[in-house]
Amino acid sequence: MLDTKINLLVIDDDDINIFIIKKIVEKTGFDIEMTSKSNGQQAIDFLKDVIANDRPIPHLILIDINMPVMNGWEFVEAYASLAITQKVDLYILSSSVYENDIERTKSYTSVKGFISKPLSMERLTELIKDIRI
């Protein structure tokens, strides 16, 4: 077990998916601080506030693709312009079955991979164990 609190940011406009992820987080046994935002713009604003106030940057960010205001791809591009120097693991978490979405994920060096919804406890546990703090 990691003995450091993990900061998780979930960007998804589906309240049911957020609820499911919260329940999975509770069951992992890890000390996880989860924040959720319903679109990419809210997440960018959140991260700018975190940076401005010298608060802990999320270790792990899970990003849905299809959201209002700013979608997942737009978030990843806007994220690149933030001055974040810490290592952050970004993953696309989507119900998309389109091969071009999976391939597009590979075109972003900041994104570690594509995860199909729903997120499982086993997969979240793997992601957390892979975090290097």
Image (tube, rainbow, N blue to C red):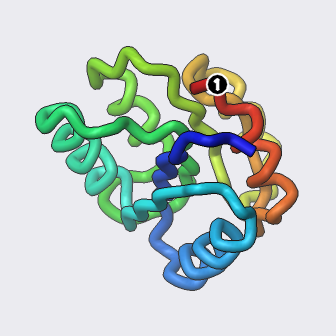
Q: Amino acid at mark 1?
A: Arg
Q: Nearer the viewer, residue 15 or 65?
A: 15
- Which residue occupies 51% across, 51% down? 8
- Which residue occupies 45% across, 35% down? 76
Residue 34 at x, y percent in the picture: 47, 61
The local crowd at label 1, few if under 14, some if 14 to 19, many if 20 or more residues have their Cα within 10 Å, is few
Q: Return the residue at label 1.
A: 132
Using residue 125 as the reference point, say whether residue 55 is left or right of it: left
Q: Nearer the viewer, residue 97 or 25?
A: 25
Residue 33 at x, y percent in the picture: 47, 58
Is 117 drawn above or below residue 132 in the view shown?
Answer: below
| Quarter of the image that includes the C terminus | top right
Residue 111 at x, y percent in the picture: 61, 29
Q: Can you name the residue that lies furthest to the left here?
A: 52
| Quarter of the image that includes the N terminus | top right
Is 124 drawn above or below residue 112 in the view shown?
Answer: below
Q: Can you name the residue that lies furthest to the right here?
A: 122
Is 123 drawn above or below residue 18 in the view shown?
Answer: above
